[in-house]
Image (spheres, rainbow, N blue to C red):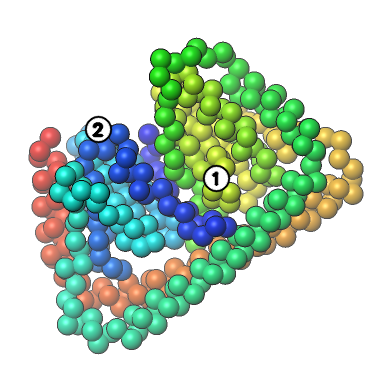
Amino acid sequence: MVDTCFLGANTPLGFRSEYAALQTDPRIRRLLILKGGPGCGKSTLMKTLAARAEDCGWAVERVLCSSDPDSLDGVTVPELGLALVDGTAPHVVEPALCGCGENYVNLGRCYREAELRALAPAIRAARTANQACYGPVYGCLRAAASLTEARRGLLSRTRLEAVTKEALEQLLPEKLPQGKRPGTGRRLYLSGVTPKGLMTLDPGVERLWAIYDGYGVGGALMQGLAARLTAAGEDVILGMDPLEPEAVEAVIAPARSQGWVRLRPDFRGARLAMLRLDLDSAMEEGLTGETLEGLKALAASGSQLLGQAVEWLRRAKAAHDLMEELYRPAVDFAAVTRQTELLCRELFTEV
């Protein structure tokens, strides 16, 4: 497991979600789906539940919100087979069979609706302002992705294949035995395009390879690592790339507490890895000075576009914060607290 992750990402293809995978996750036997609008205490409930679980000695996975990394969108307690997730848009989750291991927790009933009706025009305006920001966000990300593709087009495919093969042997040199059963790959995001900037979370493993990949050429390398490990029967965690959501950015092997993470120059990493591999330098071998200057100029333009995407996300968050400010005075927080306490008592005294 990882301590902290995203299950949704802002990408060039729009918002991408891995939340539904919780419904088929073999670790999860009970899934609680939180419903309720802005400001009703969903994130606070999950933070309280996570803290109580840790006080009881259980390990917790926290799922951060990609539109506000200070908020939680989910909590998983694998030892209890338990997950609690925010099932509201844009990461809508509904029970497959309600009451059969999956059910709702409704915090929307804690609104004092009579007070909210008078605020409907202001709330609607704030929601419209929030939603309007995401068009520019995804437009900037699409433009940045096209520049990444253009940069890759200036590199040698033959060179890339050779570098990938050599890097794979360096990153996982031991010959792994064939497993009795193939391992599984659980998808999530370790990186996010957020209002707080471009961030890559610490996977929390003892041995971490940092793979510097400014050109975004390491997807095949990560797939190769994952294929070797799963063929040997090892279960892995696949960190998908928010800038190319079908590409693997990170491979984590929990059983061996080892991980490999591709790092982009614009993303802030949580820590420096002791083991490093520089794909950029390897790919630049043999390129002319003129080509390198062109690549550098394209990278600078891409960085500006990513910065604009972050700025639009900040505007979106400001509009969402205004919605929460409008809602909060009409929330019965005493009722939210009672519901939180009842839920913690139910979940943690059954064990």
Across and down, in percent, residue 198 comes to 55, 54
Across and down, in percent, residue 75 comes to 30, 46
Q: Which quadrant would residue 337 be assigned to in this image?
A: bottom left
Q: Residue 246 got which mark?
A: 1
Given residues 306 and 28, the one toward you in this image is 28
Given residues 161 and 38, the one toward you in this image is 161
Element class at badge 2? helix
Of the residues under marks 2 and 1, which one precedes in the sequence? Answer: 2
Residue extending furthest toward the front:
97
Q: Which quadrant would residue 124 be assigned to in this image?
A: bottom left
Report which residue position mark 2 lands on.
79
Q: Is residue 294 visible?
A: yes
Write the residue at 25% across / 87% down: 118
**Quadrant position of the N terminus in the picture:** top left
Across and down, in percent, residue 203 comes to 46, 37
Does 9 sit left or right of 28 as displayed?
right
Q: Nearer the viewer, mark 2 or mark 1?
A: 1
Amino acid type at image mark 2: Glu
How crowded pointer 2 is (Cα within 10 Å; few <14, some 14-19, many 20+) is rated as few
Q: Residue 77 got which mark?
A: none
**Above-or-below relation of 51 to 71:** above
Q: Give the spatial CA distance, label 2 vs label 1.
A: 30 Å
**Above-or-below relation of 170 to 340:** above
Amino acid type at image mark 1: Glu
**Above-or-below relation of 32 to 278:** below
Write the residue at 26% across / 44% down: 83
Does 288 sit left or right of 151 as displayed?
right
Element class at badge 1? strand
Q: Is residue 53 visible?
A: no
Write the residue at 54% across / 23% down: 228
